[in-house]
Image (tube, rainbow, N blue to C red):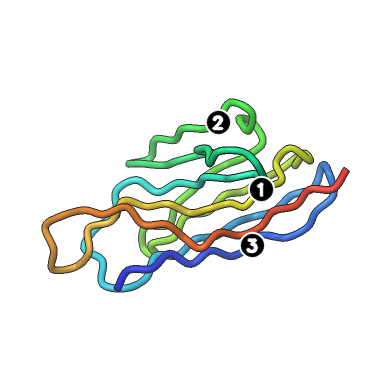
Amino acid sequence: QVQLVESGGGLVQAGGSLRLSCAASGSIASINVMGWYRQAPGKQRELVARIFSGSTNYLASVKGRFTISRDNSKNTVYLQMNSLKPEDTAVYYCNADIQPGGQWNRFEYWGQGTQVTVSS
């Protein structure tokens, strides 16, 4: 069974940095897009960054501060977050488009979420 397990959230002061990790485990044939979303209280979930075949996309408000990267040998995606602001406070979710081993179809998977809190 495929799972996404996140780590690296926490509490940090404004201007600080955090690095999130998300590892996909289980029987996996291939992984297409991997990305990070976030959801703040009372707001809709939004795409923060995604990476596919070396190409990246970022939410405008995080460009220049966040960097998404990927280690295909470990089925892991990272989100390096620098110059954090209080408005970055949210639950961050890992997302991936995965073809499980032995199956033809691809499915979208989500991590359990990790809290990031930025104090002012």
Q: Secondary structure at mark 3?
A: loop
State which tag comes first along the sequence, 2 or 1: 2
- Residue 37 relative to residue 27: left or right: right
Kindly identify which residue carries mark 3: 8
**Residue, disc 2:** 59
Q: Nearer the viewer, residue 50 or 73?
A: 50
Total count of labels:
3
Instruction: Name the one closer to the observer, 38 or 25.
Output: 38
- Mark 1 Cα-neighbour bin, 10 Å: few <14, some 14–19, many ≥20: many
* In this view, 75 is above or below 34: below
Report if the CB atoms under discs 3 and 1 are less than 8 Å apart: no
Q: Crowding at label 2, few (<14), some or many (≥20) Cα neighbours within 10 Å? A: few
- Does the CB distance between marks 3 and 2 fall below 8 Å? no
Q: CA distance from mark 3 to mark 2?
A: 20 Å
Residue 116 is left or right of residue 118, and the answer is left
Q: Which mark is residue 90?
A: 1
Residue 65, percent from left and from top:
67, 36
Q: Whole-percent x and y of residue 7? A: 59, 65
Q: Secondary structure at mark 2?
A: loop
In this view, the residue farthest toward the right is 120
**Which residue is at the front of the view, 55 or 27?**
27
Residue ID at (31%, 51%): 97
- C-alpha span from label 3 to label 1: 13 Å
Q: Amino acid at mark 3?
A: Gly
Q: Quadrant of the N terminus?
A: bottom left
> Percent position (x, y) of residue 116?
69, 53
The amino acid type of the residue labelled 1 equals Ala
**Residue 47 in the image, given as x and y percentages of width and height:** 50, 38
Amino acid type at circle 2 is Leu
